[in-house]
Amino acid sequence: MIVCEFSIVPLGAGESVSAYVARCQAIVGESGLPHQLTAMGTLIEGDWDAVLTVIRACHMAVRADNRRVSTLIRMDDRDAPPGRIEQKVRSVEEKLQRSISPRM
Amino acid sequence: MIVCEFSIVPLGAGESVSAYVARCQAIVGESGLPHQLTAMGTLIEGDWDAVLTVIRACHMAVRADNRRVSTLIRMDDRDAPPGRIEQKVRSVEEKLQRSISPRM
Amino acid sequence: MIVCEFSIVPLGAGESVSAYVARCQAIVGESGLPHQLTAMGTLIEGDWDAVLTVIRACHMAVRADNRRVSTLIRMDDRDAPPGRIEQKVRSVEEKLQRSISPRM
Amino acid sequence: MIVCEFSIVPLGAGESVSAYVARCQAIVGESGLPHQLTAMGTLIEGDWDAVLTVIRACHMAVRADNRRVSTLIRMDDRDAPPGRIEQKVRSVEEKLQRSISPRM
């Protein structure tokens, strides 16, 4: 199962790019894949083809309106059950909790 | 004001790295900077020196136990008031809401 | 035309990963796409599907031997003729040369 | 010794950013650190403070002219002798050569 973060930025579209992020977010929502929007990108979870199909559609939607687009994709692919967008954060928080309260 | 995402991964430490993420998370918490943990990294907000001081401390903490460490830092530096970790997401969600409900 | 940099790193495979980079490099070479190996990744040039087909094959080759793989992909997609891996560097060097020798 | 790749992109400065890359390249050259310009970023080698001092100067030079700047930094920090920008590529090429010519 792949957890993937991506960010798609048009160059030459001015300083604010949130309208393009919103357009991508709509595409991500329609995909039905688990997802989360953060201040620095969008997280989605699925297998390679599912995830890349969504990112390709987002990239092409932004590229259609812009002559230059910069796209970043980061993947964490691991033998693990689905639900990793939440589970990865929970796993760290549990370890953090134990180290703060060593006697509990 | 800089919103920064970072991720610090030891190579050769085995498949699970959440103990190291937890150690970094403790350092981030002590910094007092606004922050958020996601499945793919840690977001923090501040000026260059504040943000890099925290990331340096995290990198060195992981490096102390590992002969090889891979660190990624992404920054979005913009003339904008603080609180951007939440504000950037809100700005997209508002645009998304308007495009879904064009008559409201 | 997309210029793409990618980096594929197995976690838990030990400190040295150059054998996996070499395996990917062989796949890239067989693709026939323009490419360049650097100390931090592999550059390739092509359209979306050509580039992603190669990166998918590399990712899967590394993943086949490892339970966890971290993959980074950065794309610069622009209306521009092929040959951008060299042309982008040349364009900067020309500007640099002019700024060093302003009277020439 | 850290091998570092960085990329600094102004948003809202138009489609071409090579003038800013050239300005950064001049700063990198003055630093005296080993470096290499590629189509997707600049590689430099040094310890944390040396490398980040250079990247900070580059970021601030671009930021001085632009209200929004996106900066990416990737580090590979390893117990290894200097000269890694070339050595890392050489190490892969040697493994690739051996796998192509297994009897030599």
Image (cartoon, coloured by chain):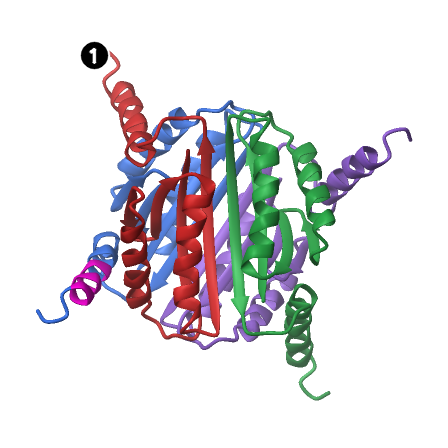
Chain colours: A blue, B red, C purple, D green
**Which residue is pictured at 28% across the width and 34% down the height?**
B86
Q: Nearer the viewer, residue D90 or B56?
A: B56
**Neighbourhood count class around disc 1 (C-alpha, 10 Å): few under 14, some 14–19, many 20 upward:** few
Question: Which residue in the rendered view is the most extreme toward the right?
Answer: C104
Q: Position of residue A102 (x, y in %)?
A: 14, 70
Q: Position of residue D100 (x, y in %)?
A: 67, 77
| Quadrant assignment, res B18 | bottom left
Q: Position of residue C97 (x, y in %)?
A: 82, 38
Q: Chain of mark 1?
A: B
In the picture, measured across the screen, residue A31 lies left or right of residue C69, that is: left
Vertical side of D95 occupied by B92: above or below? above
Q: Which residues are magenta?
A: A92-100
| Quadrant assignment, res B62 | bottom left
In the picture, measured across the screen, residue C89 lies left or right of residue B92, that is: right
Residue A49 appearing in the image: yes
**Which residue is pictured at 45% across the width and 77% down the height?**
C14
Image quarter where the N terminus of chain A lies is bottom left
- Count every numbered label the image shows and give the total: 1
Q: Main secondary structure of the magenta part?
A: helix
Q: Nearer the viewer, residue A104 or A39?
A: A104
Is A94 covered by the magenta stretch? Answer: yes
Q: Nearer the viewer, residue C69 or C16?
A: C16
In the picture, measured across the screen, residue B76 lies left or right of residue A97, that is: right
Provide the residue designation for mark 1: B104
| Quadrant assignment, res B35 | top left
Vertical side of D33 occupied by A69: above or below? above
Vertical side of A23 occupied by C17: above or below? below
Image quarter where the C terminus of chain A lies is bottom left
Residue C84 appearing in the image: no
**Which residue is pictured at 27% across the width and 61% down the height?**
B22
Is D103 covered by the magenta stretch? Answer: no
Inspect the image, locate mark 1, and give the three-letter code of the amino acid beneath it. Met
